[in-house]
Amino acid sequence: MRRQSLINLFLLLIVLLLGLFVWLTPEEREQPTVIPLTALQPSAIKHIEIRNNNGPAFVLQRNADSWQMTAPYPIAANGPRIDILMDLLSTPQVETFPLPADRLAEFGLDKPLAEVTFNDTLIIFGGTHPYNYRRYVRIDDQLYLINDIFPHHVLAQAEAFISHALLPANVQINQITTPDWQIKADNTQWRLTPLADTVSQEQLQRKIDTWLHTWVSKVTKPPDVERTGSVTITLKQDPTPLTFGIVKQQKQTLLIQESLGLAYHLNSDSLLQPPGESH
């Protein structure tokens, strides 16, 4: 037999052996099923309450198309952050077993880190596993081990779950008064005080729109410092004016909503600059 024929026969034999090996090899086992921590669906959640040791408990309530904080502040809530928090509902169970009632301290559940209630389901956060640092959580009398990716949410203060919108949604402004200027609705146009002939109605409307659509970098409790002035905003929907105290710091400007005791951190002080002024 010629040398080339022997090589071809040898290659054919290898192919047949490989085919036989694949045919005889059992199918790969299915990947383990990922079991979520709860069976709750985010769309079904109407009420959330968070308790921790970093401040008073706070309550979030779903309205028709948005979230509202009802305590300790009656104010619009931070919807995107709530969506992230609700990922907890479907986070995978790494391990689960019945809770040993006489070993709560071992799992950090004698003095819980935080408690989060979704509708009627209470999730209690304990300590972390000593080797893999996953988090122990309790639901009823069952203990679960999950990846530790939620503490910065469940340990947050109420202010962290307030909407970053400076003004309520779907409102209209009648008047803005700052220490240096005022814009007021006058029939079908805006009137600026002090009067500036070089400022157009378009520029005044742009200033109004900027106030309406301002989002701040964060919301906190206000610092105990003297205000350098105030801003008063009158809305068409509410005869009671909104008053913001002004605190100018080295790197940012704060608007303090005095009625609620909240500080809105502006990304710049352009809101306070007169209409038409470049910034």
Image: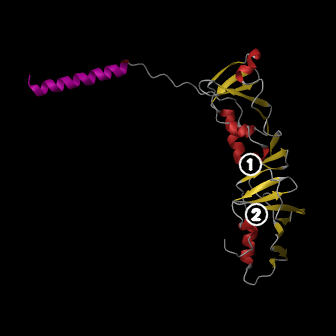
Q: Residue 155: which quarter of the image?
A: top right
Q: Residue 43: which quarter of the image?
A: top right
Tag 1 residue: 78
Give the Cα separation between the discs numbered 2 and 1.
17 Å
Neighbourhood count class around disc 1 (C-alpha, 10 Å): few under 14, some 14–19, many 20 upward: many
Residue 52, percent from left and from top: 78, 35
Considering the image in quadrants, where does the C terminus appear?
bottom right
Q: Amino acid at mark 1?
A: Asn
**Was residue 9 drawn as part of the magenta stretch in this picture?**
yes
Q: Is residue 13 left or right of residue 249?
A: left
Q: Nearer the viewer, residue 122 or 41?
A: 122
Q: Which residues are magenta?
A: 1-23
Q: Residue furthest left?
A: 2
Q: Residue furthest right?
A: 239
Q: Secondary structure at mark 1?
A: loop
In the picture shown, does residue 121 fall above or below 210?
A: above
Tag 2 residue: 212
Q: Amino acid at mark 2?
A: Leu
What residue do we see at 72% from left, 43% from top? 82
Residue 160, percent from left and from top: 74, 46
Q: Nearer the viewer, residue 109 or 225?
A: 225
In the picture shown, does residue 62 fall above or below 192?
A: above
Note whether residue 167 is visible: no
What residue do we see at 74% from left, 21% from top? 105
Secondary structure mostly taken by the magenta-highlighted segment of the chain: helix
Q: Is residue 64 left or right of residue 106?
A: right
Residue 153, percent from left and from top: 71, 40
